[in-house]
Image (spheres, helix red, strand yellow):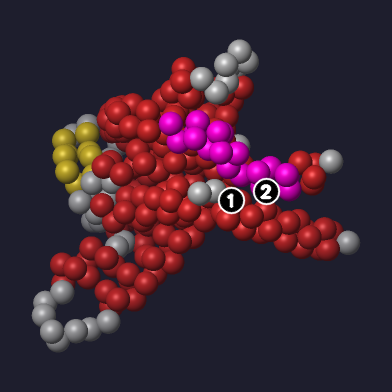
């Protein structure tokens, strides 16, 4: 009996996810997925590194990932945004698998050592980044939704959007950076990188600075996100999905 209920539940979740991904405008899903994949690739290059600060190339697109989640959370809700995040993570893992396979295929055309190193990646960095991104996505979506509920008078106004976006982005980015740093530089690096490691204070400090820089980019581009949400509301985007959810609940 329990197995039947669990199987039915999984089928319902899959059905809702497919419907959701079909309902969210394709450019939004495409840009989000591309930003997650690109962020993973650009993270291989460190742009700035000091004792208490490390910034990788992923910072240039991380704002797009979090702004996309903020837009979807505002219009479809936190559960829908988390579903979209899981979809992006799965696509990213598939992409990394394909990249890895390409990196280990020998070629006599040229020396592809540097290329193979970049696209091949490091398994524990991928694991750390995946756990960090999923955790921060859930945190970002819940915080964003919770703050939105506080704006009873004008929940669709500009102030409500930027408040929920700025606060949730900073908190989400902080935990994304912190979880990644702790797992990579305190758990795996001492084992696989000849004893190299960070202290917890370094992880926290870098996470705060990184979140502040990523928040700046979110602030710069948030007007675009606000206009998108208003446009979705005016055009009744997601009608099919909302009707399905309402019928299911009733």
Give the percent coordinates (x, y) of residue 87: 52, 56
Check residue 240 for magenta coloring: yes
Q: With respect to residue 121, does 68 lie above or below?
A: above
Image point (29%, 67%), residue name: 120
In the rendered image, residue 102, in percent from the top left (x then y), is placed at 30, 76
Mark 1 residue element: helix
User: Residue 29, how many percent across, how many down?
Assistant: 47, 51
Q: Which quadrant: the N terminus?
A: bottom right
Which disc is residue 216 wearing?
none
Residue 240's tag is: 2
Question: From this viewpoint, is residue 173 visible?
Answer: yes
Please tell me whether the stretch drawn in magenta is mainly helix, strand or loop.
helix
Furthest residue toward left: 110
Q: Is residue 175 visible?
A: no
Q: CA distance from mark 1 to mark 2?
A: 7 Å
Judge whether residue 43 is colored magenta. Answer: no
Residue bearing the label numbered 1 = 23
* Residue drawn 76% across the image and 41% down it: 246
Task: Give SS at disc 2.
Answer: helix
Range of the magenta residues? 227-245
- Earlier in the chain: of badge 1 and badge 2, it is 1
Q: Whole-percent x and y of residue 163?
A: 46, 20
Which quarter shows the C terminus?
A: top right
Q: Is residue 97 left or right of residue 104?
A: right
State which quadrant residue 111 falls in.
Answer: bottom left
Determine the residue positioned at 50% across, 31% down: 230
Residue 176 occupies quadrant = top left
Of residues 125 and 110, the one drawn nearer to the viewer in this rendering: 110
Give the farthest residue toward the top: 153
């Amino acid at each position: 009996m329990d197995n039947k209920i669990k199987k039915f539940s999984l089928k319902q979740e899959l059905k809702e996810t497919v419907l959701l991904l079909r309902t969210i405008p394709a450019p939004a899903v495409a840009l989000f997925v591309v930003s997650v994949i690109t962020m993973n690739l650009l993270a291989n290059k460190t742009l700035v590194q000091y004792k208490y600060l490390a910034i990788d190339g992923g910072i240039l697109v991380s704002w797009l990932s979090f702004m996309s989640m903020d837009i979807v959370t505002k219009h479809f809700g936190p559960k829908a945004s988390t579903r979209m995040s899981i979809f992006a993570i799965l696509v990213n893992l598939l992409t990394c698998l394909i990249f890895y396979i390409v990196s280990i295929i020998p070629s006599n055309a040229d020396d592809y050592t540097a290329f193979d190193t970049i696209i091949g990646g490091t398994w524990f960095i991928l694991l750390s980044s995946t756990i960090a991104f999923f955790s921060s996505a859930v945190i970002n979506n819940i915080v964003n939704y919770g703050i939105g509920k506080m704006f009873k008078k004008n929940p669709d106004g500009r102030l409500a959007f930027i408040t929920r976006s700025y606060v949730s982005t900073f908190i989400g980015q902080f935990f994304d950076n912190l979880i990644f740093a702790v797992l990579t530089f305190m758990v795996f690096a001492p084992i696989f990188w000849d004893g190299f490691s960070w202290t917890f204070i370094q992880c926290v400090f870098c996470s705060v600075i990184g979140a502040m820089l990523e928040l700046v980019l979110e602030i710069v581009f948030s007007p675009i996100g606000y206009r998108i949400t208003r446009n979705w509301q005016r055009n009744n985007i997601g009608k099919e999905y909302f009707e399905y959810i309402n019928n299911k609940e009733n």
